Structures are given as structure tokens and as C-alpha cells.
Image (tube, rainbow, N blue to C red):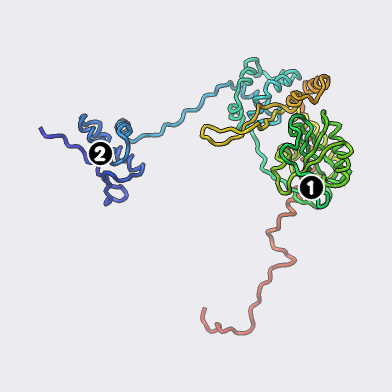
Amino acid sequence: MPAKEVPCLMWKCPRNPRTVVGMGSELSMGARAEITRKYATAYARASKGDKGRMLDEVCAVTGWSRDNARRRLTQAAKRPGGAKKEAPRPRGRKYSYDALKVLQKVWAASGGQCGKYLAASMPLLLDLLQSHGELDDEPRYTPQVRAELEAMSAATIDRYLAPVRAKDPVRGISTTKAGPLLRNSITIRKAGDEIEAAPGFFEVDTVAHCGPVLKGEFARTLNMTDVLTGWVFTRTMRNNAEKHIIAALDAAIDAVPFPLLGMDFDNGSEFINHGVVAWAGNLGIYFTRARPYRKNDQATIESKNNHLVRRYGFYYRYDTDTERATLNRLWSLVDDRLNFLTPTRKPVGWGTDKAGRRKRLYDAPATPLERLLSTDALTGQHKDELIAYRDSLNPAKIARRIHDLQASLIMQAKTKTDELYAAQIPSALPDVHHSIRVKKASRHPTRFAGIPT
């Protein structure tokens, strides 16, 4: 009985029929897939011995293992048209729609916290909103919905809130100018200069509310952040004159609930001057400064300049008493939100991930108040007063007042700032007073006059 003929696996390239690929040649994935589709039917109908010989040839041509070649030929025989990509099934929602809607409301009241922070502050925010009656008129809020909100992971919160998040791509202007005389007399901050075991060491900077131009007088905002706890203080001044800086620093000493021990700032002349240095010396506050042109030396305060001052105060130009008063009312609300209601994370060391790459390690999210209460900087009575003040805060009311003050700032400053931006853009139209000169035709004949056109 004659042996059954086994199909030859010499393959011709469809783009160039003269090119023949045999055993041992390197093929692209497309060529291998075409070989598989072409010989899958013959493999399915062949006997056991013929299948073994076909597998030997397929492995020699494609470089696959026998198991891989067998699986691909079998699958291709079941799907003559080739393997088709299955559409991914939509992921079912783990939590209810009511929980999603209440989550959006809590997120808005929190000031737009990210998932990691909102998951940590969820019980506190729900308690405050519920105690102030903000959820009484919310029919979706039930004990079951609260249990769902408290069970949500940070990644789930971020995924559910992705459609409602807003981004602000605007950037500001740097106005730092080094002080030439007093700078060298102030110590450059080194690792360990700050008192890590106790709160009171602040990074300090000023933010210019100049709009697109630095001309004229405009408001400045003093921004202070405690390195250990993350406690913030913000105050807007008329300008960065020495007397205004000292007045804002005095206000910080009165407002911060723990002693101010030291300050670190950049090399700007608003801090490096005899008046501010003498003020700090009289109060026993030691000064350190960052290295020139090294912004990462003040990473904490530079971050706060962006997501505190710029996020809430925008990039408009403020130069009137009314605008400065509005900003200071805004900062008192923002400081309460960040100090009492918004968790933060602090780096605690370095580790490695599963791939062996170095990665930063952080502690569990905690509010600046919680970090402050874990230290010995406060008495028991003072701690009770701060906790009582935190419990009196209404996150939804704070959010509404912040929105109203921001709307007021937009009405006061947006138009004039837009006009300043427009003035900085060169006009694309020709100047009618200095129009383009057109060269007149010469009266004298040229050497090309006899050439016909």
C-alpha cells in the first residue's frame, strides 16, 4: 500500500513568489502564521506518523518547540480564518452606582484628593459631612454605601473618579533673585540640619502674583511648610519689602500651634537682608539657605507653591487691596483643609521592587494634625483644642466658600491679566504707520530689456 503523501513545507513569499523559504531559514511572525494557516488542515487529517514528520518540519522551519507547533496547528485548524482577537469583556462594577455618586460628592468636598489620600481620609470626611448634615438630603447615602466607600481601594477610587478629574496646565514665572552681600553669612542647609524628631523647621518661599509681566507692584504670597508634619501657613503681602516679610512671619508665629525653631529658604533678597536676619536672631530662630540654582534643595516648599498657591490662587495678577484681602480669606480656608483634613505621605527609606529596581518607600498617609499629635510638641490640653477645632470643620462648607472666593478672584483679576497677556503677543498684522516699502521700477533700461517675456 503506497504511503500517504505529506505536504512539503517549502514556502513561497506572497510578496515575492521567487523567494522560497526552506528549513533553517529565519522567518517573521507573519510568515510563520501563514505557514500555520496553510498546513493546519493537512495536519488535522494526517495520521499519527505523518503528524510527527510534519511537526519535525514545522519546528525546523519556524524554530518553534514541538508543543508550540502542535498547539498552533491545532488552533489554526479549528479557526480556518486564523486566530481572531476576542473583544475584551467590559469590567463589571464592583461597587454600586449610589456609592459612585456619593464618592464624587465626598471627593469634591475634600478638595480633589487623589485615591491614596482619599482612601485614608474617607472615614474622617464621612464623619464630618454626616455630623454637619451635608448628607441628610442625599438619598443615596446609606450604611451600605458608607461601607462600600470605606472598603474602596485607592486604585478603585482613582478609576471611578477619572472622568471627573480636571487638570490645570498653566505655568508660572520665577522671580527669585540672589542677595549678593548677606548670602555668604548664612549657612547652606545640609542633611541633618533640620530637627527631624520635632516639628518647627519650616521651608519658606514667596510666590509672585505678577501675571505675565514683572513690571510694577504686585502681590506676593509667603508660603511656609513644616518639614516633619507638613503643616502649612500662607499669607499674601503687598510686595516683598522687608517690613511686609517680617509682618507675615510674625503672623505665622501667632498662627502656627507649635514653636517655630528654624527656617530654610532660597537665595532671594526678600529673605537675605539685615532686617529679616536680625528679626530671626532676636527670636532665636536659626536660618539655613539652599544652594544657589538647586531647586531640589527645597523640594517640599516648591511642591506646595504649585499645588497650594497656584492651584487655589491661579496665575492672575493681583495688585489691589481688595484682591489681597480676598486671597488672605482664601488662604485661611485652604490652610484648614490641608492641615486638618488632607493626608500626606512622607518618604521613609529605599527598597527594591520585584524586578530589583530601586524604589522610594513611604509611610502610611496621615494629616499634618495627626503627625503633630504623635509628637511631644503639644500639651494634652492643646491637643484636645486642636481635635475639637478639627471636628468643628465642615468640609462641604469649606469647599463652597473656597469656590466663591475663587470666583471673586476671577472676576477681579481675569480681564486685566488677559489684557497683559495679549499685550505680550506681537501683532501678526502689518503696522499701518510703518508699512512695507515696495521697490519702485527703475526708469533706466536694463540689460534684459530686449529679451521677450
Location of residue 422 with respect to 119 vertically, above or below:
below
Q: Are marks 1 and 2 in contact (CB under 8 Å)?
A: no
Residue under numbered circle 1? 268
Location of residue 320 with respect to 102 vertically, above or below:
below
Q: CA distance from mark 1 to mark 2?
A: 76 Å
Mark 2 element type: helix
Q: Is residue 87 visible?
A: yes
Label 1 Cα crowd, 10 Å radius (few <14 / some 14-19 / many 20+): some
Residue under numbered circle 2? 57
In this view, the residue in front, 71 or 393, is: 71
Residue 54, percent across and down?
A: 24, 36
Location of residue 181 with respect to 3 vertically, above or below:
below
User: Given the current orientation, which residue lies at the most extreme left position?
Assistant: 1
Left or right of 300? Residue 161 is left
Q: Nearer the viewer, mark 1 or mark 2?
A: 1
User: At x 29% / y 38%, what residue is drawn?
Assistant: 59
